[in-house]
Amino acid sequence: MSADLHMSLVSRGLGIGVLTPAALSESRWRDAVEVIEAPDFSPKVVNWLVHRPPAGPLARPIATFGEALKVALKTRGRF
């Protein structure tokens, strides 16, 4: 879902949200929510590569993309 929809729901009391500072500053809902600082919060990013088997002629590009994604995520370190 978009950050705007997410913030709209949070501003109406329908949940909590995690946003980047840039997304918050650009949101029209920024004054309608309470910002809570959580310095010890350390989110984990999970990536999935999903495709429909059998991949046929796309098997090689899918595998290549998957390997490139693994390498990129290992070399970039923490977000």
Image (cartoon, rainbow, N blue to C red):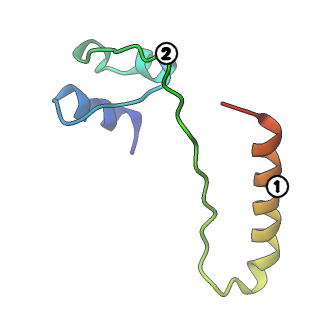
Q: Which residue is mark 1?
A: 68
Q: Is residue 6 left or right of residue 62?
A: left
Q: Quadrant of residue 72?
A: top right
Q: Position of residue 38 (x, y in %)?
A: 43, 18
For marks 2 and 1, the one nearer the N-term is 2
Q: Nearer the viewer, mark 2 or mark 1?
A: 2
Above-or-below relation of 14 to 72: above
- Disc 1 residue type? Ala
Position of the C terminus, as image quadrant, is top right
Residue 2: x percent and y percent? 40, 40
Identity of the residue drawn at 83% across and 65% down: 64
Residue sitting at x 83%, y 50%? 71
Instruction: Classify 51 as above or below 34.
Output: below
Residue designated by label 2 = 39
Which label is found at residue 28? Answer: none
Determine crowd level at label 2: few under 14, some 14-19, many 20+ residues with C-alpha closer than 10 A: few
Q: Which quarter of the rendered picture does the N terminus lie within?
A: top left
In screen coordinates, is 44 left or right of 26? right
Percent coordinates x, y for residue 47 in the rendering? 61, 53
Residue depicted at x 34% and y 15%: 36
Q: Position of residue 37 (x, y in %)?
A: 40, 13
Kind of element beneath mark 1:
helix
- Label 1: how many residues lie within 10 Å, few (<14), some (14-19) or many (20+)? few
Image quadrant where residue 63 sits: bottom right
Badge 2 element: loop
